[in-house]
Image: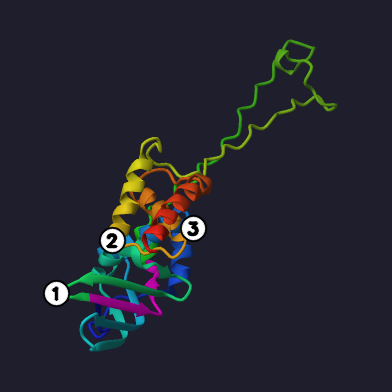
Amino acid sequence: MAGDDSEGFPTREWVSAMQALLLTKALLNETDAGASSVLIRWAASGDVASRCRLARSWGDESEDITDVRNSNVEPEFWHRFGAMERAHGSNWKAGDFTIRFWQREWANVTITGVEFDALGIRDSAPPLPEQLPSIAPPQSAPMTGFDGPRLQDRGRTSPEGALDVVEPPESRMPTRRVGRPSKDYWEEALVEIMRQIWMAELKPRRAADVRHAMAEWIVEQGYEEPKPTQLKERARLIFQVYEKSQE
């Protein structure tokens, strides 16, 4: 999952996991969940390099623990992590990430002190639209052979006789995330969360874990990000059923 740093790479601008998340969020005008999903996808494709202070791997049935220090994180780790993030969570502030997968036995890999290449993030983000130059309104040519005020100036002249020009309001682009309509995804989301719980991919300790997992799945499917109030009640009901099943 992690390789050594002896092969040589082009110049990198290493930043912490949290700084990388904030940079991605700012470049894409995304939410935390949306930015983390995009950054993981870039790392999984190899477009954004990453490294860690420690990579530790072990199996459930074996007592062997393998530690690799100061290593590059291979895209395969992020590919697996992207598919399992809801089941294992992450600590972006500390830069700690864990995956668990089946490979003749249940295997676990934890990486700590993760850093991402900020240059790769900037290169992967779509270019921002260039600001259009402002165009001044054309001025009316003076009329000759007429002593009174111009027709278009009538009732609008200043004490100096100049035309009062009203500047048009600045246009504002909406900042709300755009996605597919939300009319039909709730049933799919509920089924997906129950599947994750049934397959032991998601082991929630509280209703918030269910809420986060559901929100991430909805965004990953390309739907508009739901409002917290829409998620809270559904997540609470699912968690109540899960808690009763554990009794």
Highlighted range, magenta = 107-119
Circles 3 and 1, Cβ within 8 Å, touching? The answer is no
Residue 104's mark? 1
Q: Earlier in the sequence, mark 2 or mark 1?
A: 2
Amino acid bearing label 3: Ala
State which quarter of the image contains the N terminus.
Answer: bottom left
Q: Secondary structure at mark 3?
A: helix
Q: Earlier in the sequence, mark 3 or mark 1?
A: 3
Q: Secondary structure at mark 2?
A: helix
Which residue bears the numbered disc 2? 83
Q: Is residue 219 left or right of residue 32?
A: left
Image x and y of residue 212, in percent: 44, 57
**Mark 2, mark 1: which one is toward the viewer?**
1
Instruction: Identify the residue position indicated by label 3 in the image.
Output: 26
Q: What is the three-letter code of the residue carrying label 2?
A: Ala
The location of residue 21, given as percent across then percent down, is: 44, 65
Residue 216 versus residue 203 in the image, above or below: above
Image side of residue 54 versus residue 162, left or right: left
